[in-house]
Amino acid sequence: MEKVHLISLGCPKNLIDSELMVGALSRAGYAMTSEAADAEVVVVNTCAFIESAKQESIDTILAAAELKHRAPGRRLVVAGCLAQRYGDELREQLPEVDIFVGTGNFLELPDLLRRTERPEHRPVPYPGAAHLLPGLDAPRVLSGPAFSAYLKVSEGCNHRCAFCIIPKIRGRHESRPLDDLVAEARSLAALGVREINLIAQDLTAWGRDLNPPSSLAALLRGLAAIDGLRWIRLLYCYPNLVSDELLDTIAELDPVVKYIDMPLQHADDEMLRAMRRERSGAALHRLLERIRSRIPQVALRTSFIVGFPGETSAAFARLIDFVRAEQFERVGVFTYSREENTVAYDLPGQVAERVMRARRAELMEVQAEISMRRNCVLVGREVEVLVEGPAVDSIAGPTGRLATQAPEIDGLVFLTGAAAAGEFVKARVDRAMTYDLSATIIESI
């Protein structure tokens, strides 16, 4: 029985692919190990969305290659988006890699590992854009906490944003069937999962390509009826597909947390057009008004790109004004990454790196002030908290999250009192920080 160590990089969507790979390997008789030094096979599941992610992937591959060099017979697998996007080049540049698997054939890994016993059968990288949409028959081994899981509802994307390479890696949008998703969510709940985070390249497009067509609102109703699920969260919603039906369903269903993650990317009209986004700044303002009017107390998370080609000081100032006016609960800011084979790669007006970094810092400073004010409002209030477990500092109490704090990307609640991971508690907020809160546990709920 060979031991396999898997390193998962990138987003939660990639994490699910890693969990499926682990499931396939385990079913085939491989043993998983958390120590790379103990493994006969090291798998690196890569990300290739932006330059920093590509660099992290390359650095991780080279570190794994060094491990292989020190242990003759060890095999190295490179999987995921980087292999899908640059498979041919990587095969030439990294001869120490035994197997490349892309985003469309990673479940073939057990068979490919058996084939590498004969060098002449060394697998060829998977060509073109591709994704794999597994059903319930594909085994999946959860890698996160027992009480929280991601549920990938679709793959691929039909949008053609000027800065994004994802459609050329993972292909066109494809929804999983509703019954399939409800069945997986039910099995997760049976394992003790209490929080499900719905993810996709474009969550709000779910169901439109099914026969007969369905909608994200219908999926939410199916998931909300599952016993044991307490929080259902929406991540990666696309602005122009946020319907009144969806908003009313979020407002109506108790298990669906009042939280929407909706990347807007910019607010200046010229920038939005250059990015190939569908809405003007004024249209985005109307959308946000509509969301807040239909879902009282909703928490809105968004992300913006600064330094996109042609972004002038005036365009950036309009983005700053937009963020100040809208008072988002959560904001992420990214500097533009110039990616080959995207429309934006050859656009004139490329912005200097130092200017991009300065603009990101300025926008984050504006949002930090907004976040601090919003957190201060919560001081003295009683809130529901999902306990995640002990703090990194073992002297401190446990940490947790509000329903309006998504795992890994938003802030934490630092708790005073005793509670077990996965438990829901009522707590009183004692202190506000820029992104985090401190609270005292009152009781379990």
Image (cartoon, rainbow, N blue to C red):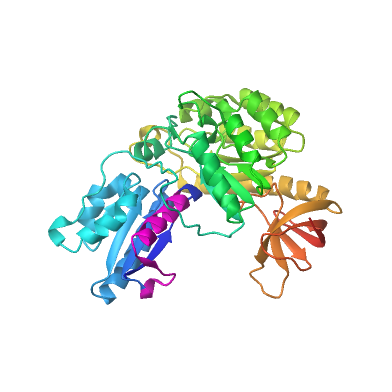
Relative to 233, is 312 above or below?
A: above
Image quadrant in which the N terminus is located: bottom left
- Which residue is nearer to you in this view: 425 or 31? 31
- Which residue is nearer to you in this view: 436 or 174? 174
Q: How many marks?
A: 0
Queried whether the magenta region covers residue 30, the answer comes back as yes
Residue lying at 42% horizontally and 50% vertically, measured from the top left = 17
What x and y, as percent, mark residue 236?
55, 39
State whether residue 367 appears in this view. yes
What x and y, as percent, mark residue 300?
67, 39
Image quadrant in which the C terminus is located: bottom right
Segment tinted magenta in the rendering: 14-38
Residue lying at 40% horizontally and 39% vertically, measured from the top left = 166
Based on the displayed image, in which of its 4 quarters is residue 157 positioned?
A: top left
Residue lying at 48% horizontally and 23% vertically, measured from the top left = 212
For this orientation, the residue located farthest to the left is: 120
State whether residue 307 appears in this view. no
Instruction: Tell me if 92 is positioned left or right of 427 in this view.
Output: left
For this orientation, the residue located farthest to the right is: 380
- Which residue is nearer to you in this view: 126 or 53? 126
Relative to 176, is 53 above or below?
A: below
- Which residue is nearer to you in this view: 394 or 341? 394
